[in-house]
Image (tube, rainbow, N blue to C red):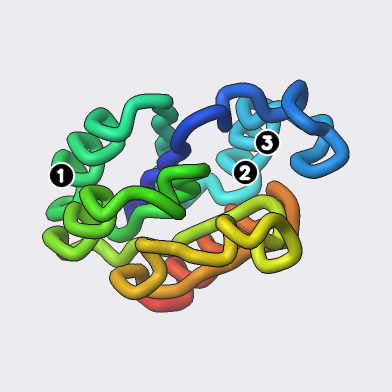
Amino acid sequence: MQILLLNGPNLNLLGVREPEVYGKETFTDYFRQLKNKYPLVDISCFQSNVEGELIDKIHEVGFSYDGIILNAGAYTHTSIALADAIAAVKAPVVEVHISNTARREAFRHVSYLTAVCRGVIMGFGLKSYELALLALINEK
């Protein structure tokens, strides 16, 4: 089983950026732990601050991988292009957010991605990624 964890803008700053919202752990440290916990799953990750690179990665793996876990960051609330890319591929996509976006600023309450994603997990910190992974594993 191949799963991609795809992170959008500013998620390269996890552990540094707003630790009261996003926590103090880096994504690199968390990803290493996740891979160790699920050795039978081929988990890769990719992060970009560039919308087009995220779309290219969805196109690249969306017909061959078993799933994509996507934290699109602020692009969640702005990107019709990302929604179109998700809708175009076969792999199920789970939308993930570290924080509970429904409890934050009003502009974060709208997601252009939810309608084309298999599901949404939010508000459980970095554990949201593992919950999405379990959802994809249990779907198989």
Which residue is at a point 45% across and 74% down the rendered structure image? 119
What is the three-letter code of the residue carrying label 3? Tyr
Query: Can you name the residue that lies furthest to the front here?
Result: 106
Label of residue 32 in the image: none
Q: Which residue is mark 1?
A: 59
For numbered disc 1, what is the local secondary structure? helix
Residue located 34% across and 74% down the image: 115
Q: Report the amino acid beneath label 1.
A: His
Q: Along the horizontal axis of the image, is 107 left or right of 1?
A: right
Q: Nearer the viewer, residue 40 or 113?
A: 113
* Residue at x-position 36% and y-position 54%: 68
Instruction: Count the marks.
Output: 3
* The N terminus: image quadrant: bottom left
In this rendering, position of residue 30 left or right of residue 79:
right
From the image, tell me which residue sits under label 2.
34
Position above or below: 108 against 34: below
Which residue in the protein does label 3 denote? Answer: 30
What is the x, y in percent for residue 49?
42, 25
**Depth order, front residue of 38/54:** 54
Instruction: Tell me if 102 is positioned left or right of 96 in this view.
Output: right
Of helix, strand and loop, which one carries label 3? helix
* Nearest to viewer (mark 2 / mark 1): 1
Q: Where is the C terminus found, in terms of image quarters?
A: bottom left
Q: State which mark lies toward you, 3 or 2.
A: 3
Sequence order check, earlier mark of 1 and 3: 3
Do the residues under discs 3 and 2 have CB atoms within 8 angstroms?
yes
Q: Secondary structure at mark 2?
A: helix
Q: Residues within 10 Å of mark 3 (few under 14, many from 20)?
A: some
Label 2, label 1: how far apart the Cα atoms are? 24 Å
Going by the numbered disc 2, the residue's amino acid type is: Leu
Residue at (48% x, 31% y) in the render:
9
